[in-house]
Structures are given as structure tokens and as C-alpha cells.
Image (cartoon, rainbow, N blue to C red):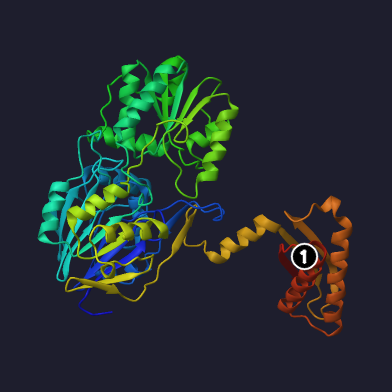
């Protein structure tokens, strides 16, 4: 790497959806932008959350001057508590973003130095001169970040759409972006999430029309699930409920917390007598109530998933109730969402979702909006961010069609580094990157090896072989005894297990005759003998765990 070039290090959110995080390194200092998490796929058995790998930054912690949060969604702020435990630096963001982040930090017992910025506004962080521009998104107070560096001006859009009629009246500030473009943008890092969608993303305000029609026809209780951070959507639900004389109850820890933050900061306006506690829901007639809850992505322990399974302690969906899933599945979550929908249909409820009703619009700009932003900014160089590889590739094509030379565009993935020097970009050396898994309270104690073991256990089960030997001469004193868990049902496979035990006994007798007493060798022999026999008879490969006891 050129020692004096500005480096843009992609630690998450490029080549994937979620875990958005990047770092800008210049003159011996580092500025971090966003610190998001993602949710596990079905293959990540037992994993609760997925974080970026912070190793590159931990090894250079003395260089890190601060972290800027562009908005309050989990895929941009959700990993902050883990990051700040490792690297204690100031945090910068707009009021709502910091309000949501602060709640998360308090839940984890993490203290931080939080600094409020405004958009439009500016802030010097270390040697980095930053400017902030208002962006319209599915959460209030989103912003883009412009960073001045010795080798050029960088514009990071954050998540955005060009909503013509935003709920809060806060448009993406194209006028300011145009002025910055006239000054010269050397590198644009642009949100690619909806690059494969043609046209423009509909305004958030049209969701209100769709919800109002459903509310008007509903004869019983309405249960609506959406992202807990989508305060624009929650505001519309509250306003429609108030129009129709319905009380509103919020369910789900993150939902309740975000509503409280939104109300405290004035981003969510609710009449004093509209909200009722979930414990008081039974005191209100079903036709006079609305429940707004978490679980729009089919998360197993979220409110709507528990309701669909009939396991929620305080909320049940009954025949002729109306359930609205006001969100689209994040890629990878489709099967979980479908499972929840099936459970809801079984209750006899009337179910509305993005596939059959206008109850959701995206917070990300589609291809025409991405093109308009590129034409407005006129960047000299372009790197698409936020999305899987196809999204990045399509966004690159949009940039080419709108005036960015092909040799000034780089498609990056996590771990890649771009060097900006004298207004031009080139690739640098990759850095350590990857996924850090959170399982319960453990962080990083679940890795590829543990996941592989869990997948084996889930697929073929485990076969335990217990044998007791004489420590002096290797004589078998007891066993081998075989225990099957998730492999074969012992009562129905007794002959098979007895034959397998006999095979192991024969192999161990050979070792006994040779005077072998090393337990590691005995374990290896058990594993190999059992594995060969099991594969021969079943064509399956359970995890085989020999337990050798010496007396």
C-alpha cells in the first residue's frame, strides 16, 4: 500500500446485506463509519447475531478517532456495544440515531462518549473534516457523510431514497448534494440495496393509504408487525388508529424501547390516551384495539413468531382478526417469514403482507433514484456499497450509464481496500475480515469449526462409544457401549449397534495384544472402525465421539 494514500477499508456490507461497516485511514488516523450487525442464516445453527470482524481496528486502536453513525437501523448501529468494549472512542450521530444507540448500549452496560451532530452540519473528528447531509430513509434522522481528505473528497450516502412525499417532510437534500458535487466529489460510496429494481421506490406515504383501507374494513383486532426502528410506519399506524378510535399497544422489547425514544425526542407524535399497556389489552374490545409488534422477519423469539405458534403469553390471534406484516423479508429470511405466515393463516385470521397488499415500501432508492444521485454528485470515482455482489454489479452499470468512466469504478467485497491518491483510486491489499458469531453471551467462541460440528449433529447426529480399559496393559474391562443421539433409534436398531460394538471390540483386542495403552491411539481406532462400519451400512457420517476411561 502507498504509505501516503487514503485507505477505505470495507469491513462489512459489501458483497452482503447487513453488517455495514467501513473505515477511512488517513495520515495515521482512522475514522469508522457505521457499525452494524446481521442476523444468522438457517445454516448458522444456534447463532443469535453476526458481527463484523473488528481485528483490523483493534490492532490499530490508538489510531481510531471516532465512529459516525448514519442512521439507527440495526444493520448500521447494532454491533456498536461490542465495538466500544474493544475500542472506546467518541460516537457521532443525529439525535434519534444516538437515542436508539444509547438504549442498546444501556442494555449491554456499555458507557460511551456520544456527540450529537445535525444534518446539514459539520464536525471535525481528529484530522477528518466531516459534513453531514439529510437523507430520506425508512427511519427519521438519516444522513450521508462527506469526508475531506488530503487526496480527495469522499461522499458516503448511507441508506437513502428520493421520497417525493416523506412522512416527516424531510427530503433527501439534493440541493446540498448538488453543491458538493459542483465542488468536486472524488469518490462516491453509494447504497446499492435496490439497484436491481427498475424505476423509483414508491413514497412511504402510500403505505398509509393501504393501511387505512385495511383498518376501515377490519371487524376485530388488528395486529401489525414491522421493524421496530421504522418510526415513519409506526407514526402512520398511530394516526390511522386515532382516526378510527382504536387504542394502540406496543409489544416487543425493541419496539417498546424505540417508541419511547421516538416520543421523548419528538419524532413520534401520539395522543396521551392512545397507548395502552399490553396487560390492559383484554379491557378493550377487539374491534377497538391495534397491536404493533416485532417479528416481521420471522425471528423465532420475536412477538409475531410467538403469536403465530400460539406461544405468546399475553397476545393471541383469533379467527377474523387482521394481521398485517408491514415489511419485506430480508434475503435469507424468506423461509422463516413463510413459517410465520402459515401459522397465522391456521388461526383463521385475515393476513396481509407485501405480496398481497400495499402495506410496505422499501426505504432504499431504486435504479432511477440511484442514477439521479450519481448525476447530481458527478463523482470522479465510484464504489458501490450495501448489497450482495449482484447489487454492486448492477449499481456499477448504472454509474457507467450516467457518466462515470468504467476504469474509475471498483466493485469491492468485505476485506477489500481502496486507495485514494491524487483523486484516483486503485486496489490495496486485503485486510482480515469475516463474521464474528454471537451465541448467547459468548462472542467469537462460535467459529467455522463449531458451526460445522453443529451442522453434522443436525444432519446425522452423534454416536458415542464408551470403553473402559486397564491403564497397565490395555485390557478391555467394560464396553464398548454405543449411545446414539439423533443418529438411529436405539430400540429399533439394537442389532446394528451390537454389530458395530463387536467391530470396535475386535479392533481394540488387536491393540490390547500389541500392548497399546495410549488413550489417544485407542480413541482414533474406535473412531475409524466405527466410521467405516457406519458408512458401509448406512451411508451416513454421524459425529463419532469415543470416550475412553482408564482404571
Please tell me how many numbered marks the rendered image carries.
Answer: 1
Residue 550 shows up from this direction: no
SS of the residue at dot 1? strand
In this image, 487 relative to 153: left or right? right
Residue 280 vs 419, above or below: the answer is above
Q: Camera-side residue: 394 or 447?
A: 394
In the rendered image, which quarter contains the N terminus?
bottom left
Q: Which residue is farthest front?
A: 401
In the figure, residue 203 lies in which quadrant?
A: top left
In the rendered image, which quarter contains the C terminus?
bottom right
The 10 Å Cα crowd at callout 1, few under 14, some 14 to 19, many 20 or more, is: many
Which residue is located at x 61 percent, y 59 percent? 454
Q: Which residue is mark 1?
A: 465
In this image, 333 relative to 244: left or right? right
Task: Give percent across and percent down for residue 72.
Answer: 30, 46
Task: Give percent across and percent down for residue 478.
Answer: 85, 67
Residue 67 vs 245, above or below: the answer is below
Task: Give percent across and percent down for residue 300.
Answer: 53, 42
Q: Camera-side residue: 501 or 151?
A: 151
Residue 387 vs 242, above or below: the answer is below
In this image, 426 relative to 314: left or right? left
Task: Give percent across and percent down for residue 220.
Answer: 47, 17
In this image, 458 relative to 128: left or right? right
Residue 14 shows up from this direction: yes
Amino acid at each position: 500500500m502507498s504509505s501516503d494514500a487514503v485507505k477505505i477499508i470495507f469491513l462489512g456490507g459489501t458483497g452482503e446485506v447487513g453488517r455495514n461497516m467501513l473505515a477511512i485511514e488517513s495520515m495515521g488516523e482512522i475514522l469508522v463509519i457505521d457499525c452494524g450487525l446481521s442476523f444468522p442464516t438457517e445454516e448458522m445453527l444456534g447463532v443469535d447475531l453476526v458481527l463484523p470482524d473488528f481485528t483490523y481496528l483493534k490492532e490499530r486502536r490508538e489510531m481510531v478517532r471516532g465512529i459516525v453513525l448514519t442512521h439507527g437501523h440495526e444493520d448500521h448501529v447494532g454491533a456498536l456495544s461490542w465495538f466500544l468494549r474493544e475500542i472506546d472512542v467518541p460516537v457521532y450521530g443525529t439525535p434519534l440515531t444516538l437515542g436508539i444507540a444509547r438504549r442498546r448500549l444501556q442494555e449491554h452496560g456499555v458507557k460511551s462518549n456520544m456527540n450529537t451532530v445535525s444534518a446539514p452540519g459539520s464536525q471535525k473528528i481528529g484530522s477528518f473534516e466531516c459534513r453531514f447531509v439529510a437523507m430520506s430513509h425508512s427511519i427519521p434522522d438519516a444522513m450521508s457523510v462527506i469526508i475531506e481528505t488530503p487526496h480527495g473528497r469522499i461522499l458516503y450516502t448511507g441508506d437513502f431514497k428520493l421520497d417525493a412525499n416523506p412522512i416527516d417532510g424531510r427530503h433527501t437534500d439534493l440541493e446540498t448534494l448538488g453543491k458538493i458535487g459542483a465542488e468536486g466529489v472524488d469518490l462516491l460510496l453509494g447504497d446499492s440495496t435496490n439497484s436491481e429494481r427498475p424505476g423509483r421506490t414508491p413514497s412511504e406515504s402510500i403505505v398509509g393509504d393501504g393501511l387505512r383501507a385495511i383498518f376501515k374494513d377490519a371487524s376485530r383486532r388488528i395486529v401489525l408487525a414491522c421493524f421496530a426502528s421504522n418510526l415513519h410506519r409506526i407514526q402512520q399506524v398511530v394516526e390511522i388508529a386515532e382516526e378510527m378510535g382504536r387504542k394502540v399497544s406496543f409489544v416487543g422489547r425493541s419496539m417498546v424501547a424505540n417508541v419511547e425514544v421516538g416520543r421523548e425526542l419528538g419524532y413520534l407524535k401520539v395522543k396521551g390516551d392512545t397507548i395502552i399497556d399490553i396487560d390492559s389489552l383484554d379491557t378493550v374490545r377487539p374491534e377497538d384495539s391495534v397491536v404493533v409488534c416485532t417479528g416481521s422477519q420471522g425471528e423465532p423469539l420475536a412477538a409475531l413468531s410467538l403469536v403465530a405458534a400460539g406461544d405468546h403469553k399475553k397476545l393471541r390471534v383469533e379467527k377474523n382478526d387482521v394481521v398485517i406484516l408491514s415489511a419485506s423479508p430480508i434475503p435469507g429470511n424468506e423461509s422463516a417469514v413463510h413459517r410465520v405466515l402459515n401459522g397465522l393463516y391456521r388461526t383463521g385470521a385475515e393476513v396481509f403482507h407485501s405480496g398481497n397488499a400495499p402495506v410496505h415500501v422499501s426505504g432504499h432508492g431504486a435504479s432511477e433514484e440511484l442514477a439521479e444521485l450519481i448525476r447530481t454528485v458527478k463523482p470522479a470515482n465510484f464504489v458501490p456499497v450495501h448489497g450482495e455482489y449482484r447489487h454492486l454489479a448492477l449499481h456499477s452499470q448504472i454509474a457507467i450509464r450516467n457518466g462515470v468512466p468504467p476504469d474509475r469504478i471498483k466493485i469491492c467485497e468485505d476485506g477489500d481496500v481502496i486507495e485514494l491518491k491524487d483523486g484516483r483510486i486503485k486496489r490495496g491489499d486485503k485486510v482480515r475480515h469475516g463474521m464474528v458469531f454471537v451465541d448467547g453471551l459468548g462472542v467469537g467462541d462460535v467459529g467455522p469449526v463449531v458451526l460445522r460440528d453443529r451442522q453434522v449433529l443436525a444432519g446425522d447426529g452423534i454416536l458415542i462409544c464408551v470403553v473402559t480399559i486397564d491403564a497397565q496393559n490395555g485390557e478391555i474391562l467394560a464396553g464398548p457401549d454405543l449411545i446414539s443421539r439423533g443418529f438411529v433409534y436405539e430400540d429399533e436398531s439394537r442389532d446394528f449397534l451390537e454389530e458395530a460394538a463387536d467391530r470396535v471390540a475386535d479392533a481394540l483386542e488387536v491393540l490390547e495384544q500389541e500392548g497399546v495403552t495410549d488413550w489417544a491411539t485407542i480413541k482414533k481406532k474406535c473412531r475409524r472402525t466405527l466410521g467405516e462400519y457406519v458408512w458401509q451400512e448406512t451411508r451416513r457420517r454421524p459425529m463419532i465421539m469415543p470416550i475412553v476411561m482408564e482404571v
